[in-house]
Image (spheres, rainbow, N blue to C red):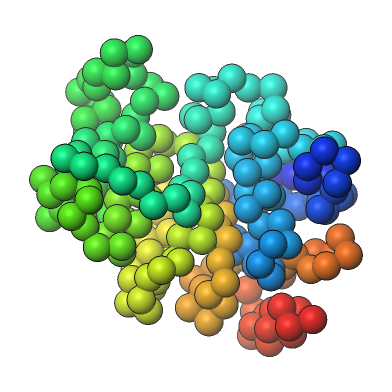
């Protein structure tokens, strides 16, 4: 479980949001929404331990991520960013295997258990047919599924994704969200992702965090009224 306690985020003396407090339970898919530049990526970076909070605390399974080493943190949270990776001559299976680095030795050599995790994850996500292809030859949708697979093989309880459906067509947006929902339910993961795709996201997320101006935020549960509430909030 992820516990956010009186968290303030921002840069230097400039706080974008303060006193953020909420929880994400195992098995939940949480969509983070808000206008461009409001602080969604900053919040995700802070929750992932990639950026220090101005104040407050983030706990994952009772561990304060601010007190962990990078290796310890990478075993609790895996991150998928919006960065478009330029990887030449790297196979999909080798790319996904990079997610095992928190568990391998300094040489990066994988053991039998590591290989088993990678193979199982590729099968579970339905991308076995991509294994021996080169990552840079894939479509945007295929690359995003492989990015998620790399995060999954880290075996962290929390997976954080920054706009995972950006640049994808409707079919691939839905495919990515179905995979995230499946991971949460079948592997009991906490899934947190930012998005602007309200319509396609609504059916697959179980909870929504909507960031608004003036340090205002709302935590909404999936319900018949939630969609209209979110649209209204995002228009304000």
Quadrant in which residue 178 is drawn: bottom left
State how many labels appear.
0
Q: Residue 236's spot in the image, x, y percent?
A: 79, 81
37 and 103: which one is in front? 37
Any part of residue 93 in sight? no
Q: Determine whether 191 is above or below 181 in the image.
A: above
Indicate left or right for 73 with 15 as reference.
Answer: left
Indicate left or right for 90 with 121 as reference.
Answer: left
Q: Residue 185's spot in the image, x, y percent?
A: 45, 57
Q: Which residue occupies 55% across, 23% down?
A: 70
Q: Residue 27's spot in the image, x, y percent?
A: 53, 54
Any part of residue 97 in sight? yes
Locate the N terminus and report the quarter of the image it occupies: top right
Q: Residue 15's spot in the image, x, y percent?
A: 85, 48
Indicate left or right for 138 with 34 as reference.
Answer: left
Q: Determine whether 200 is above or below 146 in the image.
A: below
Q: Which residue occupies 40% across, 35% down?
A: 154
1 and 161: which one is in front? 161
Indicate left or right for 181 with 208 as reference.
Answer: left
Q: Which residue occupies 66% across, 30% down?
A: 65
Quadrant in which residue 205 is drawn: bottom right
Q: Which residue occupies 56% across, 28% down?
A: 73
Q: Determine whether 229 is above or below 109 in the image.
A: below
């Amino acid at each position: 479980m992820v516990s956010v306690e009186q968290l303030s985020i921002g840069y230097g003396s400039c706080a974008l949001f303060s006193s953020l407090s909420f929880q994400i339970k195992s098995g939940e898919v949480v969509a983070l929404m808000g206008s461009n530049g409001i602080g969604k990526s900053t919040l995700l970076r802070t929750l992932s331990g990639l950026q220090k909070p101005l104040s407050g605390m983030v706990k994952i399974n009772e561990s304060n991520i601010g007190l962990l080493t990078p290796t310890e943190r990478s075993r609790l949270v895996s991150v998928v960013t919006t960065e478009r990776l330029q990887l030449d001559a790297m196979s999909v299976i080798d790319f996904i295997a990079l997610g095992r680095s928190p568990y391998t030795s300094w040489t990066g050599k994988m053991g039998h258990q590591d290989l088993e995790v990678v193979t199982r994850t590729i099968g579970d996500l339905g991308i076995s047919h991509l294994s021996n292809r080169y990552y840079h030859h894939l479509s945007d949708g295929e690359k995003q599924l492989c990015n998620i697979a790399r995060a999954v093989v880290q075996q962290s309880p929390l997976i954080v994704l920054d706009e995972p459906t950006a640049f994808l067509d409707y079919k691939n947006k839905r495919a990515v969200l179905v995979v995230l929902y499946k991971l949460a339910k079948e592997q009991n993961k906490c899934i947190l992702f930012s998005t602007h795709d309200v319509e396609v996201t609504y059916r697959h997320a179980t909870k929504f965090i909507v960031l608004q101006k003036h340090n205002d935020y709302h935590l909404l549960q999936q319900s018949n009224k939630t969609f209209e509430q979110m649209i209204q909030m995002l228009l304000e």
